[in-house]
Image (cartoon, grey):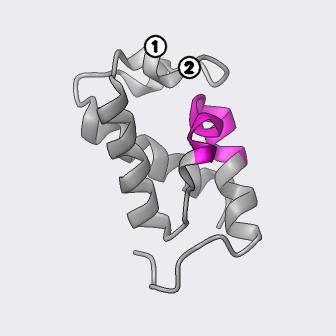
Amino acid sequence: MIRDEIRTTLLDALASVAPEADLDTLKPERLLRDQLDIDSFDFLNVILRVHEKLGVDIPEADYAKLATLVGAVDYLEIRLKQGGGTSKASG
Protein backbone atom coordinates (compact mmCIF):
# COMPACT_ATOMS: atom_id res chain seq x y z
CA MET A 1 0.00 0.00 0.00
CA ILE A 2 1.36 3.37 -0.92
CA ARG A 3 1.64 6.38 1.36
CA ASP A 4 -1.21 8.24 -0.36
CA GLU A 5 -3.61 5.38 0.36
CA ILE A 6 -2.51 5.27 3.98
CA ARG A 7 -2.95 9.05 4.27
CA THR A 8 -6.41 8.89 2.69
CA THR A 9 -7.46 6.11 5.07
CA LEU A 10 -6.20 8.13 8.03
CA LEU A 11 -7.97 11.30 6.87
CA ASP A 12 -11.21 9.37 6.39
CA ALA A 13 -10.92 8.06 9.94
CA LEU A 14 -10.25 11.56 11.25
CA ALA A 15 -13.23 12.92 9.32
CA SER A 16 -15.46 10.34 10.97
CA VAL A 17 -14.67 11.70 14.44
CA ALA A 18 -14.26 15.37 13.49
CA PRO A 19 -16.67 15.95 10.58
CA GLU A 20 -16.56 19.72 11.02
CA ALA A 21 -12.76 19.87 10.65
CA ASP A 22 -11.06 21.20 7.55
CA LEU A 23 -8.60 18.37 7.02
CA ASP A 24 -6.92 20.21 4.14
CA THR A 25 -5.41 22.64 6.65
CA LEU A 26 -3.74 19.99 8.82
CA LYS A 27 -0.06 20.58 9.46
CA PRO A 28 1.75 17.24 9.02
CA GLU A 29 4.13 17.78 11.97
CA ARG A 30 1.61 19.15 14.51
CA LEU A 31 -0.34 17.00 16.95
CA LEU A 32 -3.60 15.83 15.42
CA ARG A 33 -5.49 16.00 18.70
CA ASP A 34 -4.55 19.66 19.15
CA GLN A 35 -5.34 20.63 15.57
CA LEU A 36 -8.71 18.88 15.53
CA ASP A 37 -9.63 19.47 19.17
CA ILE A 38 -10.44 15.78 19.70
CA ASP A 39 -10.21 13.93 22.97
CA SER A 40 -8.55 10.61 23.75
CA PHE A 41 -11.78 8.68 23.08
CA ASP A 42 -12.05 10.23 19.61
CA PHE A 43 -8.39 9.43 18.96
CA LEU A 44 -8.97 5.83 19.98
CA ASN A 45 -11.86 5.67 17.51
CA VAL A 46 -9.51 6.92 14.78
CA ILE A 47 -7.05 4.15 15.63
CA LEU A 48 -9.81 1.54 15.57
CA ARG A 49 -11.08 2.74 12.19
CA VAL A 50 -7.57 2.66 10.73
CA HIS A 51 -7.16 -0.87 12.09
CA GLU A 52 -10.44 -1.93 10.47
CA LYS A 53 -9.63 -0.37 7.09
CA LEU A 54 -5.97 -1.37 6.79
CA GLY A 55 -6.05 -4.57 8.81
CA VAL A 56 -2.97 -3.47 10.72
CA ASP A 57 -2.56 -4.19 14.42
CA ILE A 58 -1.63 -1.11 16.41
CA PRO A 59 -0.46 -1.94 19.94
CA GLU A 60 -1.46 0.53 22.64
CA ALA A 61 2.22 1.17 23.32
CA ASP A 62 2.50 2.60 19.78
CA TYR A 63 -0.47 5.01 19.91
CA ALA A 64 1.85 7.98 20.45
CA LYS A 65 3.52 7.24 17.12
CA LEU A 66 0.24 8.17 15.42
CA ALA A 67 0.08 11.59 17.10
CA THR A 68 0.93 13.55 13.95
CA LEU A 69 -0.14 13.03 10.36
CA VAL A 70 3.38 12.39 9.11
CA GLY A 71 4.18 10.17 12.09
CA ALA A 72 1.05 8.11 11.58
CA VAL A 73 1.69 7.60 7.87
CA ASP A 74 5.32 6.65 8.52
CA TYR A 75 4.34 4.22 11.27
CA LEU A 76 1.54 2.58 9.30
CA GLU A 77 3.71 2.21 6.21
CA ILE A 78 6.37 0.39 8.25
CA ARG A 79 3.78 -1.82 9.98
CA LEU A 80 2.23 -2.80 6.65
CA LYS A 81 5.63 -3.59 5.13
CA GLN A 82 6.52 -5.70 8.17
CA GLY A 83 3.30 -7.65 7.84
CA GLY A 84 1.89 -6.03 10.97
CA GLY A 85 -1.64 -6.60 9.75
CA THR A 86 -4.19 -9.08 10.94
CA SER A 87 -5.03 -12.29 9.17
CA LYS A 88 -8.40 -10.94 7.99
CA ALA A 89 -8.70 -9.28 4.64
CA SER A 90 -8.76 -5.50 4.68
CA GLY A 91 -11.28 -3.43 2.85
Q: Which residue is mark 1?
A: 34
Residue at image point 61% right, 51% down: 4
**Numbered tag placed on residue 13 in the rendering:** none
Task: Name the amino acid type tagged 1.
Answer: Asp
Task: Name the amino acid type tagged 2.
Answer: Leu
Residue at image point 44% right, 55% down: 50
Mark 1 residue element: helix
Q: Tag 1: Cα neighbours inside 10 Å, few (<14), some, or many (≥20)?
A: few
What is the x, y in percent for residue 30? Answer: 61, 17
2 and 1 marks in contact (CB < 8 Å): yes
Q: Main secondary structure of the magenta part?
A: helix
Q: Tag 2: Cα neighbours inside 10 Å, few (<14), some, or many (≥20)?
A: some
Which corner quadrant of the image does residue 83 belong to? bottom right
Q: 20 left or right of 73?
A: left
Q: Quadrant of the C terminus?
A: bottom left
Q: Is 87 above or below relative to 81? A: below
Q: Nearer the viewer, residue 68 or 25?
A: 68
What is the x, y in percent for residue 66? Answer: 59, 38
Farthest residue, direction left? 20
Residues drawn in magenta: 61-74
Residue 87 is one of the magenta-drawn residues: no
Q: 2 left or right of 33?
A: right
Q: Is 65 above or below relative to 85? A: above
Q: Which residue is mark 2?
A: 31
